[in-house]
Amino acid sequence: MKFTYSTMRDYVATSLNAEALGDLLTMAGFELEGIEEETSEDPILDVKVMSNRGDGLSILGLAREVLAKDAESQPTELYLAAKSGFPNVATSRPAEALVRIDSALCNRFACVTVSGISSAATPDWIKYRLERIGMRSISLLVDLTNYVMLEIGQPLHAYDLGKLGKEIVVREARDGETIKTLDGVDRNLTAGQLMICDASRPVGVAGVMGGFDTEVDDSTTAILLESAHFVNTSVRKTRKQLGLNTEASYRFERSVDPKITDVAIRRFLQLLTSVLPEVSISELTDVVRSEPAEVFVELELARASRLLGMEITPDEASRYLSALGFEILATEPLKVKVPSWRPDVVRAEDVVEELGRVHGYERIPEELPVGHTTMGGVHGKYRLADAVVEGMIRLGYVQVVSHTLRSEHPLDAPTERVGPRNPGSPELALLRNSLLPGLTEAALRNGGKDVHLFEVGKVFENDEDGHRELAFLAVLSTGKLQPANRASDQPPVADFYSLKAELESVLRSVGITARFTADELPNEGRFHPGRRALVFDRAGDCIGVMGQIHPLVAEASDLPEATFIAEIWLDPAFRNAQENPQLKSISRNPAVSRDIAVLIDKSVPFEKIQAAIISAPTDLLENCWLFDVYEGTGIPEGKHSLGIGLQFRKMGANLTDEEGNQARDAIVAAIVELGGILR
Amino acid sequence: MENVGSLVLAAQDEITAAASTADLKQIEIKYLGKNGLITSLMRQMGSLSAEEKPAFGAAVNTAKATVQESIDNRFSALRDVELAHRFEAEKIDVTMPGRQTRVGYAHILHLTTLKIKRVLGGLGFRYEEGPELEDFKYNFDALNYPPDHPAMDDQDTFYVADDLVLRTQCTALQGRIFAQEKPPLRVFTVGRTFRNEAVDRTHNHTFHQVDCFMIDENVSMAHLKGTLGTFARAMFGPEVKVRFRPDFFPFVEPGVDYAISSPKLFNGRWVELGGAGLIHPNILEANGIDPQKYSGFAFGLGVERIPMMAYGVDDLRLFLENDLRFLSQFQGIAA
C-alpha cells in the first residue's frame, strides 16, 4: 500500500517524519517496504499489509494505527469527520435507482445518481497524490472514486447513467453470458460469478472491474455511483477465473468495512461538489441483504499479560483498544465490541495480540521457559540415521544432498513412482525412488572419476496400498581409494570388495550385521548381473542391494564401468538394529595361527567354505580370514586356490602345537567334504 | 703387574684414537670381551702364589673398570657426533606437502542441522520427523488455514493428489504430534519443504526448515523470545539480539516475524529470520487441549538462511548442486 506523507498528514497531526512513521507502522505490523523520494517535501511510503488486515489498505486504517501507537499524534478534523461517517450532501431528488440483490454473494449495494455534470479537471492536489503513488489520472469522476478508495478503503464505481438501463440487479452470471470489461477485453462468464447487471446484461464484474459499455467519458453528464460490499471469497474466485487483479478486487478479497458503503458515497459527493457545486444529486439507495454480525469478546486482562509475558494495565488496555475503534463495554473482565472493519478479531487471543502490538513487542522481555522438564535431543532411528552419516564420513565419503523432484534416470529403482500433478516442468515430474541418480549427477559434476559420495535421504515408492516414504542410504564409489601423492604411489582402487567392507563397517556401527548373497532381485537392471549382492540383516530381512554398475547403465550415465553403487534401505534396516551388544569374554592366553591353502571349485561360494570352517568339530577357532585368491599357472581350469588364515585360542590355558594342528586338521576335513583339496 | 698397567695404557691410547662408536665396540671386545686381553689376565691366577692372588685380582678388576669407564665416556662423545652427522644427512624439507589420505566430510546443511539439533535438544526439545509427502489436512487444515487460502493454490503447492501435497512447511508436524501426545511437550524438526516456484538465487522449489514448538502451562511470548534469543545466539554468536514484529500466520495468535541483529553481523541491521507466535487456540481446542490451562509457542525458519547469513553464501541453488568446490569449504565447521 503506497501513500504520500501529505495524505497521511490530512488524517493525523503528527510530528513524526516519514521515516519515523514507517518505523511505527512496521512495529504495528505494517512493514515498511520502502520510502521513495525520502528527501523531498512529500515522500512516498510503501507498507506491506498482511492478508488478514484489509483495513490497512486505506489512509484511515493506517491513521488509526498511528493514533493508537503514538500518544503524541492527534486526529485531524478530516479524521474525525471520516470517523463520524462524513456529513450528508444536499440532495435535490428522491432515490431513483431500482436495485435488487439476487445473490447471497452481495451483502449490500448502495448508490446515488448524479446529473448535471459538466466537464471539469481533477483538482491538482488529488491528481498529484494519485500520480505520486503510481495511479494514472483518468478523469475527474474516475480519479475521485480512486481517491476515496485510497482514503477510506471502499472501492467505488461510476457508471454513465445514459448508457445504463433503469434497473440494477446484482446476480450471478449465467453460463454463456459475456461482458466487455473496462480494459476492452471480451470475457466469457460462467455460472456463479457475481455481476452487476441492468435489465438486459451484465454491466460490471462485482468487486473487480466495471463494464466497457457503461464507462464514463468526457461526454458523461449523469452517473450512477456504486458503493457495495461483496463476499470476499466470491470476488477472489471470479478474479482468478477471469485473470483480473484490480485495486478493488485486492481490497474486497482481504476485507472491506461492510459499514462504509454510504460513508464512501458521502465523501465522494463532498469532493465532487467542491469541484462542481451545481450538480444534482439523488437520495441514497441502500439495499442491505445481510448485516454483518456484531462480535463481542471477553478477556481477563491478567491472562493477556500472562500470555504476552508483559504487564498491561486496565488503563492502557482501554486506551489502546478505544484508539483502534473497539467499544469498551466492561472492564473486569474486559468486554469489547469489535469494530466492523476488523473481521480478523473473533476471540480473546486476537485481542491479546492487539494489546501486545500497540503496547510494543519490543517491551517483551526474554525469558526461558519454566515448568515441566522434558527429555530433549535426538533419539532412536533419527540418531541411527545421523550415525550412518558419521560412519560414512569416517570411511572417507563426502555427503551430498540432492533434489527430491526430478526427471527419469537410468539408475531409478524398479519401483512404481509418484509425482506432482502440477510439476511446472518435466525436470520436476517425479519424486525420486532412488538416491543413485542424484549421486550420479553429483559424481559427474565433480569430474566423474576418483569420487566417493553418499547421500542419506527420503525416497518415494508406490503400490496398490498407496505410497511409501522411506529413508535410504546410497553410496557411489569409483576410482582411487587414496590419493596418489607421489608418482611412485600405487593406491588401491574401488572394487566390489572395498565397497562391501565399507558397507559392513558402517552398518556394524549402527548395530546391523550384514550378510551379502547372490540372490536375484526381480527387475533390478542397474547392476552387473555377476557382480552384485543383496544385503540382509541378522533377522533375514533384505535391507539393500550393492555391486558394480551395469556396463550399459554406466555408458548411459557417463560413468566409468568400474563404478560401485549401493542402496541401503534404512527404514527396514533400523528395525532390527541391535542396541545392546552382549560382551564375549576375551582370553588372556596367546593365540596359535595356522595358514592353509585349499584348491577348490570356483563355483563353491566362500560363504559355504566359511560356514564349514566355523561349524568344524573344534571349539578353539577364534578367527578365520581369506588372505589369498589364486588362479592361473598350476591351477586346473574352473578351480582356484584359496589361502585361509586360522587363529586358535583357549580360555585360561595356552595351546600346544599339537592342539593347533588337530584343530586345523578338523577344519581341513570339513573343507575336503566340500570337494576341496589341501595344497 | 706391570703387564696390567701397560695393557691399560695401550687400551686408553686406542680408546682415545677411536674414530667411531663402531671402532670403540671393537676395542671393547679386544680388551674386555670374553677372551679380551685384560679379561684373559685372570687365567694367570693359577700360576700365582696364594699371597700374590688377591693383589693381582684386585689390579685386574681395577684395570677392567678403568678401561670400561674410558670406553663409556668416549662412546657417548662419539655417539653425539655421529647422531649430529646423521641428523644433518637425514634432514627433510618439512614444507613439502603432507601425504594426503582421503577424507570424508558432511554437507553444510547436515552440519547446520546437527548444530540446530544440539542447541534445541539442549533446551529440552525432542527431535521428530514428519513425512515430506504430507496429508493436505496436516499441511493446512490442522494449522487453522481457512478453506480457499491462497497458499493452497496449484501455483504455490505441489499436489500429488487432492489430499496429498509435498509439504510447504515443516509446521505440518505440529498437527501430527498434537493428535498423538498431550502437553507438556517440546518438539522440533528439521526437514525438507517444497514450494511450486521458479528457481533463482534466492528462491528454490526445494529447501529446508526448522520448526520448533512447545505447549505447557503459562507459556508466554517472553518464553518464545527467550528461547529464540538463546537459539539465535547459539547459532550466530553471543551478541545477537531478537526483535519481534507483528505478522500473520494462520497457526499462531499473536503472530510475529522475528529478526536478529548483531554488531558483528549484517552491519548491525535487523535481518528477518522467520515466523513465530503463540500456537493458535483453535489448534489447541481442535486437539482437546484447553487453551485456558495451556498455551504454547512455535517458531520456524529456513535452514539455508543460517549458512547464508553466517558464511556469506549468496546463492540458494548452491546447496543442492553438490559442487565439491562449494561443499569442501565447510570442513572447518564443528557442528
Image: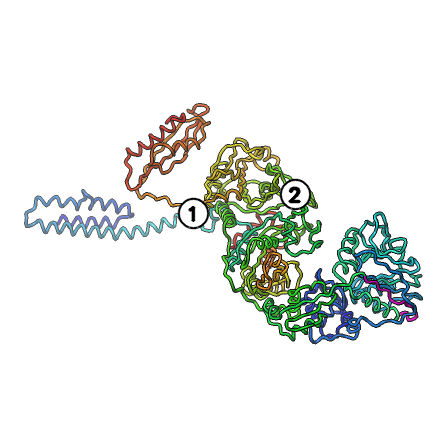
**First reached walking from the N terminus: tag 2 or tag 1:** 2
In the rendered image, residue A337 lying in the magenta stretch gets the answer no
Q: Position of residue B239 (x, y in %)?
A: 55, 65
**Residue A182 can be seen, yes or no:** yes
**Few, some or many residues within 10 Å of mark 1 (<14, 14–19, 20+):** few
Q: Mark 2 or mark 1, which is nearer to you?
A: 1
Where, by quadrant of the figure, is residue B313 drawn? bottom right
Alpha-carbon span between mark 2 and mark 1: 40 Å
Quadrant containing the N terminus of chain A is bottom right
Decide which of B10, B63 is in the foreground and name it. Answer: B63
Residue type at the position of mark 1: Asn
Q: How many marks?
A: 2
Chain on which label 2 sits: A
Q: Which residue matches tag 1?
A: A580
Residue type at the position of mark 2: Gly
Q: Which residue matches tag 2?
A: A419
Along the horizontal axis of the image, is B155 left or right of A192?
A: left
In the rendered image, residue A285 lying in the magenta stretch gets the answer yes
- Magenta stretch bounds: A274-288
Chain on which label 1 sits: A
Along the horizontal axis of the image, is B55 left or right of A423?
A: left
Decide which of A350, A672 is in the foreground and name it. Answer: A350
Q: Position of residue A363 (x, y in %)?
A: 61, 70
Quadrant containing the C terminus of chain A is top left
